[in-house]
Amino acid sequence: MAMSLKKSIPLVLMVMAVPAIPAVIFTLVGWGEASNIWMLGTVTGALAILSSTVRLSVYTVILLAIASTLAVLNQGNPWGSMLIMGACAAISGIASVRGLVSAVNFFAISAAFFVAQPPVVSTSLSTVQDAVVVGFIALCSGFWGLAISGKVFHKIHFPPAAPLEARHATLMAIILALLVGGAAWVVADRNLGHGGAWLMMTILIVVQPGISSTFKRSVQRAIGTLAGFGIAIVLSAFVSTPIVEILVGLVLLGMALLVKMDSRRAYWQYVVFLTPGVVLVVASSGQEGSLLDLSISRLGFTIIGSLIGLITVALLLPFYRNSSAKPDSPAVKAS
């Protein structure tokens, strides 16, 4: 895992630039929805292969393709949204029994964006056809990110999180399913769109079993997310065109990856770069207003999600302390 910054930067540039080429092309031709789908799939595949085995990464990409297809077919039905996101969140929780939540969690985050606002790649397609296209793009982009990252970083892997005991992993799976599934129902019922996706994403980031077992670490995640939105709001004064938004977003995602590769860095520093990177990539579609409007509107949902997550973690702190994942273990610190 140890690698000098001088050697890391070219590799990170390559692993971010090559998989993102199709997304840039989609943006240039005005196909913003396809660009968003591609970037979500690419990041999901890349993070999965850097955190686990090839086999689990393949399963993660397939799960995202299935979730994205179901999200389009569901067409924002509250009960269907609850079931889809509840299942995705539960899978993330169950993965903690083997310390694999880091590899699986971003699949659930990506699924949240598909469920909150099912993408329409072409108005000339039927719902079923659109669902197939969305699932296919998610599948291709996931494997694209997996292949590039696996090739470039074939000798580098993020340290695995300490596994939880089966009973604690089951408890967290149930808690996540209830929280995220319930949030998905509200998001769909109130038609909150991508704003609701930020709500679900924040809950998934803050309440992460198997990576952190202390309230302090959860606070770090919440602070990092809020600070990341502050960066996005500042950047909105200088970034206004879709192509620039996606390029700057890629740079920020690359910086997040660099921080993630350095086990000496705190988790909040990783989230600080990850959050505005995702905001800019989403804003590049041009379908949700300016970057400033997007950042400010999503900030409220992030605060609500952070409070929900922090209160939940605080209530479950005794279970975390009794978990087999020790707070001071090297694997947990490196996550």
Image (cartoon, grey):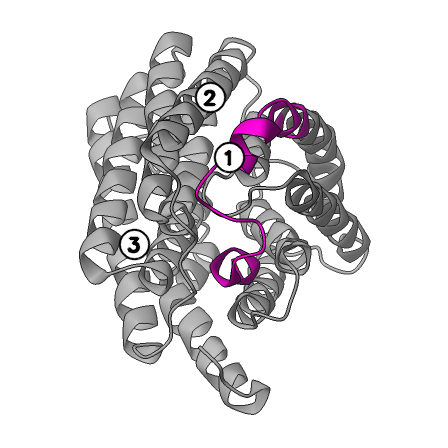
Q: Residues within 10 Å of mark 3 (few under 14, many from 20)?
A: many
Report which quarter residue 240 is drawn in: bottom right
Report which quarter residue 194 is drawn in: top right
Residue 32 position in % (x across, y down) = 46, 47
Identify the residue at image location x=56%, y=69%. Answer: 263
Identify the residue at image location x=78%, y=60%. Answer: 238
Q: Secondary structure at mark 3?
A: helix
Residue 212 position in % (x across, y down) = 55, 46
Magenta residues: mostly which secondary structure? helix
* Marker disc for residue 175: 2
Q: Which amino acid lies under the numbered mark 3 shown in the image of this protein?
A: Gly
In this rendering, the label closer to the viewer, 1 or 3: 1
Q: Secondary structure at mark 1?
A: loop
Residue 301 position in % (x across, y down) = 67, 28
Marks 1 and 2, Cα distance to the nearest angstrom?
A: 17 Å
What's the magenta region?
Answer: 309-335
Q: Which residue is mark 3?
A: 142
* Marker disc for residue 18: none
Q: Viewed as shown, does residue 166 lie left or right of 136?
A: right
- Front residue of 34 and 267: 267
Comes first in the chain, label 1 or label 3 = 3
